[in-house]
Image (cartoon, rainbow, N blue to C red):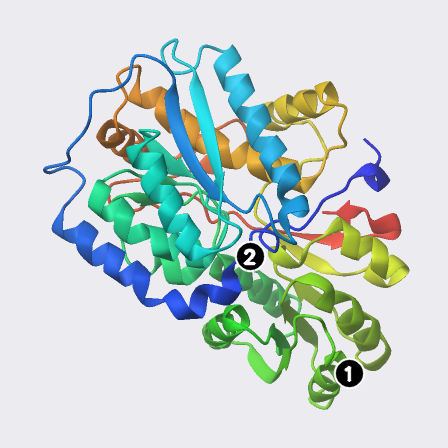
Amino acid sequence: MQEEKKRALTRRKLMGGIAAAGATIALPALAQDRAAKAPASAGATEAKAPAGDIVIGQSAHLTGPLAPTFQAVLRGQDMAIKEFNRKGGVGGRNVRLVTLDDAYDPAKTVANVTQLIEREEATALYGFANTAGVAAALPIVAEKKVPLVSVYTGSPVLRARHNPFFFTTMASYGDEVDQMVRNLVTLHRGEIALVYQNSPFGQLMAPVVEQTCKAQGANLVAKAPLEVNGSDAAAAVATLAAAKPQAIIFMSFGPSLIPFVKIARQKIAAPIYCVSIANSRQLIDALGDEARGLAIAQIVPYPFRPITPLTRSYHAAMEAAELPVDYDHFFGYINLQVLLEGMRRAGKGITPQKLVTAMEGMRSTDLGGYTVDFSPTNHHGSRFVELVMVGPGGRYLR
């Protein structure tokens, strides 16, 4: 596949909802407390497994300004589930994904969760796409004892305390920052400046960057907030430039990337490292040659070379769909693969409790090029982060 065909849209950027996280930080703790009082292995009430399809319930933004950019992820999920059912599903039973629209609204997420569990009789919840929505759902997950597996947000807030009904399959934003700072220290670029989105997302992540720099022996020499639309990019760049940093960490997403990078290229001779949510084919194209040299954290393996069983099956699915290979389809494809493997292991008589047990038994499980490692005390299956660089023509280079 030619790199210029790839239309990798923003992944976690698209799955935002992060701006609402600050108002719901207390909810994960509430969920953990309720879950702790009712362990998954004791007293779980389960309905008899239906004889027909096994239902997975998803709440995500199907409408709203960012809905179009989520379509690639949804298509990736669809490819994974069709492939799984063609191969026999769960002991001959097909898996059906029911996706309801929440339009980034946590209140709608809560309503959707209730509908998915009570009306659709979902065996598992999956693929919620914003931090606030996940936080709002966790108390219900704890109460109903239906596992939520594989979400599209890497917020460390949601992972702070163990929840026996909550599983993640991708690295956290904290893991991304750790990898970036570690790389910069290795390159002797330990004088780091931070630009962070002026929203709850950025405000929550700024201390994470500070703590990581301290732990890695780096020095955070300056930090500046940045509005979502990038209107204050010049002021942010001026603040950072005064400290003469050796590198910049870009902790933001969306259109602010364009003005910030354009101005920073003129004022600061330092590489710019971006978290995965900043990655967008549209933004890279808009930056043109000024995108060259951007370092971007990716939390799924490099998809452009079919050298593993997973990437080969992904390429075959994309070719059959007549779509160019990109990160976003792969993100949805892998994310659902993890849950489907847990369901396969739970067997034909799957119930929510059996799924929890099966997921916890996936120790060092290689899915064909992507490894997850769960246990009864660890429900966060991956810390995989790979740094790629934007090269000529907007190609992603390793």
Q: Secondary structure at mark 2?
A: loop
| Residue mark closest to the camera, 2 vs 1 | 2
* Quadrant the N terminus occupies: top right
- Identify the residue at image location x=64%, y=26%: 314
Residue 224 visible within the image: yes
Please tell me how many numbered marks the rendered image carries: 2
Q: Amino acid at mark 1?
A: Ala
Q: Quadrant of residue 307?
A: top right
The residue labelled by disc 1 is 234
Label 2 environment density (alpha carbons within 10 Å; few <14, some 14–19, many ≥20): many
Q: Quadrant of residue 44?
A: top left
Residue 188 visible within the image: no
- Mark carried by residue 16: 2
Give the residue furthest to the left. 43
Q: Nearer the viewer, residue 330 or 226?
A: 226
Residue 158, percent from left and from top: 37, 58
- Identify the residue at image location x=70%, y=77%: 246
Q: Amino acid at mark 2?
A: Gly
Residue 139, percent from left and from top: 27, 53
Give the residue furthest to the bottom. 242
Residue 56, percent from left and from top: 40, 30
